[in-house]
Image (tube, rainbow, N blue to C red):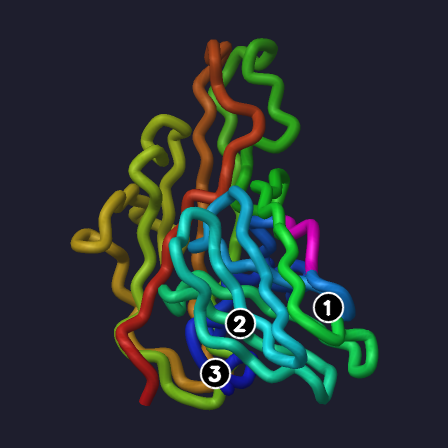
Amino acid sequence: MAATSTRADSLQLRDVTTDTEVVNLTAVGAVRGTVVTFASGANGPGGGRLKAEGPLVSWRPPGAADYGPAVDVSAGGAYLLEGPDPAKYVRLTATAGWLPPGAETARVLLADRYDNYIGIGDNIDHALHIRPVEVKRQLQLKNIGPQVLRDVRVWLDATAATYWVTISLTDSGYTAPTDEDAALMVGDLVPGGTQPLWVRHNVAPSTAGANPKLLNLVHARFDGLI
């Protein structure tokens, strides 16, 4: 069984001001005796499923045909459940003695969470302001795991240009890399290591049809654990 903070969930995107992890999906639903406390952004919104067979619980992300590896949660506590793609994981808390005695499945609805430090269309009335507005926030990539993360990189979703979003590792020279080949290279992150990441949203004056619920557009990846 993979412990929490030892695999894909070792790399966190955090808000510097509150020192908390950025949450980009909310999860509703679980099998008895469990609570989904976090779902990785790679899952995407939609309906996933949890399956319990006695103490063994497994995760099927939205759109996936199969479940990931089953994890024994009988001891209770926090667990990492991965789908067939390890990047599509959930963290789950189980309560010993409250798990279903037999087989049980449950639908878990994952929904986009807005106003989450990256969705920075927050509360800007695009139709009323007469000058360009710049909204900028400092985030942080952090290795919360026990191993070195190799070749960490970060880029934006292809839709970022539509919403005038750019990023920078240094608060200067902002760019909008929209595929992994053009990603900003962070390099290796040691355990506990951090990398600042600034996200900037430029809103043109009187922009018609701008999305006030801008979604999480940031992607991050690393090659492996050392």
3D distance between C-alphas at marks 3 and 2:
12 Å
Front disc: 1 or 3 = 1
**Magenta-span inclusion, residue 29:** yes
Q: Is residue 111 left or right of residue 199?
A: right
The residue singled out by tag 1 in the image is 34
Image quarter of the C terminus: bottom left
The residue singled out by tag 2 in the image is 81
Query: In the image, which disc is placed on residue 6?
Result: 3
Q: What element carries label 2?
A: strand
Q: Is residue 196 left or right of residue 85?
A: right
Towards the viewer: 61 or 166: 61
In the image, the segment drawn in magenta is: 26-30
Residue 96: x %, y % from top left: 79, 82
Residue 204: x %, y % from top left: 44, 19
- Identify the amino acid type marked 2: Leu
Placement of 191 over or under 93, stated as above or below:
below
Q: Is mark 1 on a helix, strand or loop?
A: strand
Residue 192: x %, y % from top left: 50, 83
The chief SS type of the magenta part is strand
Residue lying farthest to the front in this orientation: 102
Q: Is residue 133 left or right of residue 72?
A: left
Is tag 3's residue or tag 2's residue first in the polypeptide sequence?
Answer: 3
Residue 200: x %, y % from top left: 45, 41
**Residue drawn at x 27%, y 74% as measured from the top left:** 223
Q: Is residue 194 visible?
A: no
